[in-house]
Every structure is written in structure tokens, then in C-alpha cells.
Image: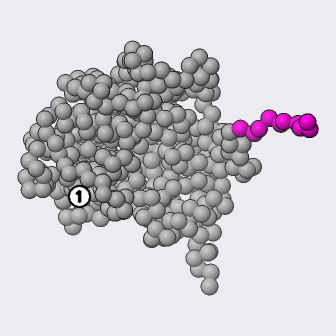
Amino acid sequence: MSSSIISKPVTGLPDYVGDGIYLHVRGERFIDCASGTFNVSLGYSAPEIIEALHGQLDRIAHLSSDFTRARSAEIFELMRDDLPPHIGAFWFRDITGSGANEAAIRIVQKATGRSDIVSLFLSHHGQTVGTTGVSGNAFRQRSFSLPFPHSVKIPGPDCANCFYGQVPGSCAMLCARRLEDFVEYASSGRVAALVVEPIMGNGGNIVPPPEWYAVLRETCDRLGVLIIADEVQTGFGRTGSFFASTGYAAALRPDVITFAKGAGGVGIPVAGVVMRPELDVLEPWEHSSTSGANPLALVALEETIRYIHRHRVLDQVRVTGERLHRGLLALSRTFPDMTGVRGVGLMQAFDLPTSVDVAQFIAVAREHGLILRGSRYGFGRTVKVRPPLIITTEQVDDLLGRLHETLRSDQREATRP
């Protein structure tokens, strides 16, 4: 019988190593301006979170949510000071934003006894059948039959491309007020809620004017329509407040808030719903997922909250976000093809002339050490700039310098005969 030497196999993904805001790929280092998939909010190597996850993994990786319900309640109490004062209940049984948004839809439908869900043009609420059905993009549905019969879409607050042909400042916020017409003429007359991203992330980083939130809230109150704030992208510090609806979009006063992505800090999947106490209506069998409220997810959620508090991350985001925004504006004055700089905190973006230009720009940016993402899964013309929330001012300046070199290289490529 012949002998052979059995070597220990290489495990994991050895070509990829994360370190703070940086992703190392086969020896090359990139500033990750996409924060993973906008879910590595505190960078790749936050030591307190990593250590806590290792400790939990050594004990147990999975438990039925029957055994973690009390821990979920403790973590919700830890969040209390970060929530709008009217929010007093939670549902932590998901690990994706799609699942959390479906939970929110079930909550408002059961609580109100009504069926219809209103959403916005260009909105993105998830990848499941239900959340794809309420999202405002045809390209994600055209290959399938994904019915969501109670979905009503309305124009969003995109001032640069106003559906109503209005000019900011004299528009009377028709994009909020005319919700009443859609409820009256386009719905079944049984509208449970409006679901809205406080800043429309995948749709093009659309930042509504501040007054839009108050007018929308007033309109919904008059119609008896609840508001679900989809904070999967804006939550956990991305805009410089814990939720956008406790900061820039506070006038929205949502009845329900969903979260995911950045809630896991270093990329651990975790998601949940928080809501007014009277909306705590679901039974465990009415919405759940196998890995919802699992021990690793809850550890990541708790340690992410503690890290944000301990390291004053929200203060840091406000400073670095403003620096990044000013830098992007300066670049747009140098490079005419770069337009529409907009954003709040570290949720920044700008436009290029076409989606083809965006794809080319992202490819050139890789050559200059930047990882960027475009809008609408490549169908849009927006470049999103969302580095981890721990980025320093010095690293912001480095990022802006690399963007400058990318824009200059991209411009030379475009003018080459």
C-alpha cells in the first residue's frame, strides 16, 4: 500500500483580507467606498466586535429564537435612547433587510386590517418576491411573474427630475401631497402604510428636501396611513444620526422602522423591526426565519451599538461626512461631467452622464485603489461613495485624492482618439 502525505487544506478566502476601511485583494489594497455591500459599517476589523464574535462562536453559533427572546429584549432596551420616543416595541427575527421589510408589511396589514402598501418610484426594499413587488423599478421584475397585488407606486421626491415639473421652493411639495390622489384613485381604498427610504439609496442616493418629511407625515396622518421607514441603508449611523429618522428626517416620525446591513458592524447578517407599541401584533408563527435572532447576530448587534456609543461614531461621521461632501463639490467644479453631488453624513454620491460612464469610472477607480458601486444595479448614472463610518479625516483626503486621479484618468480615456 503506497503512502502519501496529506497536507492541511487551505480554508476560507485567503485572497481577501479586511483591515479597517481597507480591503486587500491578492496583495493589492483598496479603500472600500462601498463598505462591503454597505453592511461593513464599522470596517473589517473592529476589535471589540470581532473578539465578542469569537467568544460566542466558541460557545454556540445557533439557538432557536425561543432561547434568545430575552436577550433580544435586553438589546432593544440598549437601543432605546437611539430611537424616536414613540417607538416602544421590536421584532428581531430576521437577518436580511428584505425579511425585515416583509415583517413590517405584515405588521401594518395585521394592525390596520388593510392591505395596500404604497411605495415610491425608484425605491428599493429588498430581493424577495414581496419586497421586489413593492420596489419601484421595472427592470427587477421584467423576467418574472412576481405578483404583489396590493402595491401602489407614487412619484418620489427627486427634485432634480421632478415628476410634476416643479421647481424647488415653489412646488408645494406635490410629491407628498398628491399621495391623497393615489389613495383615492389608484389603490383599493384600503391602504395600510407607505414604505419609504429616508434617503433613497439604490435609486440614486436621492435626498428629499427637509420639508418633504413633515408634509408627508401630515398627509399620511390625514389619510390614516402608517409610515414604514426602511432604514436598511440609512440606519446605524450612516447619516450622522443613529437613524435618519432621528436626525435629518426626524419630521417623518415613522410608525415602524426597519434595519439591517450596518447593524452587524463588521458584516454579520442581522436585521429587525422597531415600532409603536400598539403595532406589536405578530405571533411568532406569522413571521420568522431559521437564523433570526441567532446568537452571533445578536452579539454583533449589541456590540455594534456599544461601539457606536463608545467611540462617538456619530460625531465622527458628521465631521468626515461634511469633509467628504465639500471635497466632492470641489471635484465637481474641476470636472464638468461630475454633477449632482449630494448626500448626508457618509452617504454621498454624484452623477455621471450615463450608466456606461459609471461602469467605466468604477473600473478605472479600481486601478487607483478605490472600490465603488453604482446605482440601480448598473442601470443608473449615480456613483455612490459610502466608506465605513470609522474613516478618518486623513483617509477622507486620501480617498478624494484617488477620486481626483480617477476622474483625470477617466477624462483622458474619454478624449483619446
Apparent side of residue 121 relative to residue 8 in the rendered image (left or right) = left
Q: Residue furthest right?
A: 2
Question: Residue 302: in sight, yes or no?
Answer: no
* 278 versus 268 height, above or below: above
Range covered by the magenta-colored residues:
1-11
At x 37%, y 27%, the residue is: 92
In this picture, is 40 found above or below 309? below
Asked whether 2 falls inside the magenta stretch, the response is yes
Screen quadrant of the C terminus: bottom right
Figure quadrant of the N terminus: top right
Task: Say which element carries label 1.
Answer: loop
Q: Position of residue 402 (x, y in %)?
A: 63, 57
The percent coordinates of residue 151 (x first, y second) are 21, 51
Which corner quadrant of the image does residue 2 belong to?
A: top right
Query: How far across and how far down the image is residue 157, in percent?
Result: 27, 55
Asked if the stretch drawn in magenta spans residue 78, the answer is: no
Is residue 390 toward the left or the right of residue 159 in the image? Answer: right
Which residue shows up at 37% across the image and 38% down it? Answer: 99
Count the marks: 1
Which residue extends farthest bottom? 417
Mark 1: amino acid:
Pro
Q: Residues within 10 Å of mark 1 (few under 14, many from 20)?
A: some
Residue at 22% from the left image edge and 55% from the top image edge:
153
Inspect this view and state whether residue 69 appears: yes
Chosen colour scheme:
one colour
By secondary structure, the bulk of the magenta-drawn segment is best described as loop
Q: Nearer the viewer, residue 289 or 336?
A: 289
Residue under label 1, please give it. 155
Residue 133: x and y, percent?
Answer: 29, 51
Residue at screen point 72% across, 42% down: 14
